Image (cartoon, helix red, strand yellow):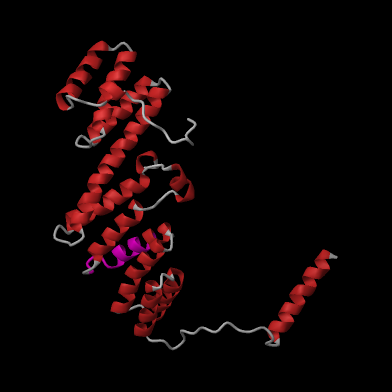
């Protein structure tokens, strides 16, 4: 009986469509010029109707693939994807623009936008509730963001976006260093002292100027001490006291207040 009902539904849908009983979807943009499509897309952007703006930009690019409107639409579409919480599509759009127009006068902004997209990609609802910070997250986005900002700073040192990119790079360096220290702290809790030392050493080697290296050194001191490796402990402590004469870790240790939800 169910199969008969499905067949009947398909039959009547086909009949109604063929007879023109179902309304046809009308494309309001038919006949619009490139200027009109771009203007309406920008209006939609101003109204934060990013999905609508994206559709206009897509139509503009497909109908008028050459000229300044199409190129600017590609840039604005990447931004619209980002604001519409579609970071993957936004990153793909920036990549495409950079490959197609490597010498475009606004390509510095596209590198900057690429860095922002990865920089601001959040954790969603759970991340907001849990207060999880960037140092406890997958570092892939942070590294991609750093690479984009570094490309901008290297290729376009005079760009108006470079000063802000430099500030964000400094933050990202410490975030990446803190991530390594966070993992090292986890290994300390699990009494995996060799692994803890390895992650702390990685942070010191790759991010020597980051503030998180202070805790990395302290982890090495504690891990070597617990393993009975006194010479290495003393060497690490000598370096730490030389650089951090009044370190809080000597009084506080590795203990820190954790959010209520953290069970591990």
> Splitting the image into 4 quarters, where does residue 197 fall?
top left
Please state the horizontal and vertical placement of residue 74, each as a whole percent of the image.
Answer: 34, 70
Residue 189 shown left or right of residue 22 in the figure: left
Taking depth in this image into account, of 203 and 259 the one nearest to the observer is 259
Residue 245 shown left or right of residue 44 in the figure: left
Q: Residue furthest right?
A: 1
Taking depth in this image into account, of 103 and 32 the one nearest to the observer is 32
**93 drawn magenta:** yes
Q: Residue at x 38, y 39 (%)?
A: 136
The answer, for residue 161, to whether it is visible in the render is: yes
User: Image height check: is 45 above or below 133?
Assistant: below
Q: Residue at x 18, y 62 (%)?
A: 160
Please state the horizontal and vertical placement of residue 169, each as a whole percent of the image.
Answer: 24, 48
* Chain part drawn in magenta: 92-104
The answer, for residue 64, to whether it is visible in the render is: no
Count of numbered circles on the image: 0
**254 drawn magenta:** no
User: Image height check: is 173 above or below 181?
Assistant: below
> Splitting the image into 4 quarters, where does residue 116 fall?
bottom left
Q: Residue at x 57, y 82 (%)?
A: 25
> Splitting the image into 4 quarters, where does residue 53 fall?
bottom left
Please state the horizontal and vertical placement of residue 227, each as a whole percent of the image.
Answer: 34, 13
Q: Residue at x 30, y 63 (%)?
A: 99
Taking depth in this image into account, of 129 and 1 the one nearest to the observer is 129
Q: Quadrant of the N terminus?
A: bottom right
- Predominant SS along the magenta part: helix
Please state the horizontal and vertical placement of residue 229, each as a whole percent of the image.
Answer: 28, 12
């Amino acid at each position: 009986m169910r199969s008969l009902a499905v067949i009947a539904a398909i039959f009547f849908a086909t009949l109604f469509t063929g007879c023109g009983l179902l309304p046809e979807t009308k494309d309001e943009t038919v006949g619009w010029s490139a200027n009109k499509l771009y203007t309406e897309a920008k209006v939609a952007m101003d109204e934060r109707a990013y999905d609508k703006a994206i559709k206009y930009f897509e139509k503009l690019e497909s109908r008028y693939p050459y000229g300044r409107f199409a190129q600017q639409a590609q840039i604005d579409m990447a931004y619209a994807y980002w604001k519409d919480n579609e970071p993957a599509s936004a990153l793909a759009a920036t990549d495409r623009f950079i490959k197609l127009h490597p010498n475009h006068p606004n390509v510095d902004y596209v590198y900057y936008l690429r860095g922002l997209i990865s920089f601001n990609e959040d954790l969603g609802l759970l991340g907001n509730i849990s207060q999880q910070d960037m140092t406890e997250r997958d570092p892939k986005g942070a590294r991609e963001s750093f690479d984009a900002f570094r490309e901008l700073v290297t290729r376009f040192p005079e760009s108006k976006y470079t000063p802000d990119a430099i500030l964000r790079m400094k933050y990202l360096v410490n975030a990446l260093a803190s991530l390594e220290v966070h993992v090292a702290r986890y290994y300390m809790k699990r009494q995996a002292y060799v692994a803890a030392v390895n992650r702390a050493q990685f942070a010191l080697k790759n991010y020597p100027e980051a503030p998180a290296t202070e805790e990395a050194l302290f982890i090495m001191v504690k891990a070597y001490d617990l393993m009975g490796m006194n010479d290495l402990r003393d060497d690490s402590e000598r370096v730490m006291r030389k650089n951090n004469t009044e370190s809080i870790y000597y009084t506080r240790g590795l203990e820190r207040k954790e959010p209520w939800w953290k069970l591990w």
